Amino acid sequence: MQNVQNNLLIINTILETQTQFNIIFIREPPWSEIHKISSLSSSEGEGLIGITHHPNWLLFTRIPVDRLNSSRVIAYINIRLSSLHFSLRSDIINHMNILLISFLNNHVCYYIMNVYSNSFHIALKYLKDTEVNIDNVLVMTGDFNIRDSLWDTAFPHHSAISDDLMIVADSFNLALSSPTNPCPTRYSNMIGGANSIIDLMFLRYGSSQLNQHSIYPDSRLASDHAPFTITISIADKIVSISKLSIPQNSEQETAFVEEIIVIFKNLETSNITDKNNLENTVNHLKALIKQAWTKNMKCLRIMKHSKQWWTEECSRSLDNYRMTRSLENWKKFKKVVKNTKRSFFDTKIQEVANKSHSP
């Protein structure tokens, strides 16, 4: 869960690298014009506004009228959870900056909520003034743009708008969550500026399985908002599927091939004089190959489209930025991603052209 401040690269990085998560809430996503569509009012056509899609993630958002009236909240649900029948419930809460999503677990309907409330507290006032009668809200999280001593000990004041937020949370049977590692959620970009806590999480009151969330300030990338996580228990039959594999075009694949070449070069075959010796040699070869495989394999999550454009070079460049958080390394990371995506899609386009025998 993170405010990405209209940064497309952050969303792309999250979707490609954070596959251990099943639900991702994004605030302030980067809406942009995809292309022009025919229009009766304009000869140039009207801009079609869109947001990043990914084959491994289901996107939940309200369709924007234009960039100025686009939603500040979206959600990505991993396709592994498709059987839980997630649904956007604008029939219950109809607000551009509030995302209410329902899902079924053991035949019970549950709700999760993503909120962006600006400095005028528009979304919060909507929730306060709207009667919503639903049970089983598990999580409400959001960028509420409220500083208060209730959740920020470094801030000495209390405001009435905070009371409104607590009333809304209580109406959904939610309680303010205390992080496992108390720290700011928004980091000032100004020299000497104060960090603050304005991103909050409310969890189902009295739940022993939902009690605390964790904040990750070192993983915020170029955003000034830190991401945070919470674990939600679901039915045992819904499990993450993984496999042991060696990623294609990876350092592990190169090392594995080199080890196999050495194994065959050093394989002693002069003692194969009968069937028993042949079986012993084959079994020995099998054990050596298995050892090399085990040494280089990785545990990968099985996705609908497991082969994507993200490469080891992208991961190394991202790690370099995370270690230094320098603007120079962020620019280098952007360049690596841009070149990698271009190469990946150029290859895909060429494959399609070759299959269709087109130039």
Image (spheres, rainbow, N blue to C red):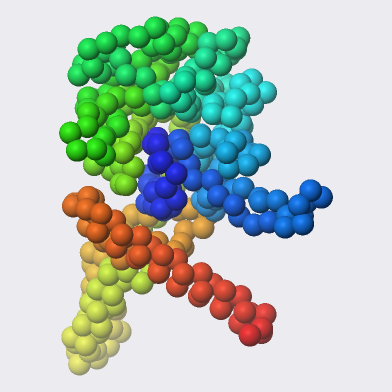
Percent x, y for residue 355?
Answer: 63, 79
Percent x, y for residue 348?
Answer: 54, 72
Vertical arrangement, residue 91 with respect to residue 278, above or below:
above
Vertical arrangement, residue 283 with respect to residue 324, above or below:
below
The quadrant in which the C terminus is found is bottom right
Vertical arrangement, residue 107 with respect to residue 190, above or below:
above
Apparent side of residue 8 relative to residue 332 in the rendered image (left or right): right
Percent x, y for residue 358?
Answer: 66, 83
Residue 109 picture quarter = top right
Vertical arrangement, residue 82 with respect to residue 176, above or below:
below
Residue 316 picture quarter = bottom left
Q: Which residue sits at x=44%, y=9%?
A: 164
- Residue 116 appears in view: yes
Percent x, y for residue 140?
Answer: 45, 22
- Residue 287 appears in view: no
Nearer to the camera, 231 or 314: 314
Q: Which residue sits at x=79%, y=48%?
A: 41
Apparent side of residue 59 relative to residue 291 in the rendered image (left or right): right
Furthest residue in direction right, as rendered: 40
Residue 351 picture quarter = bottom right
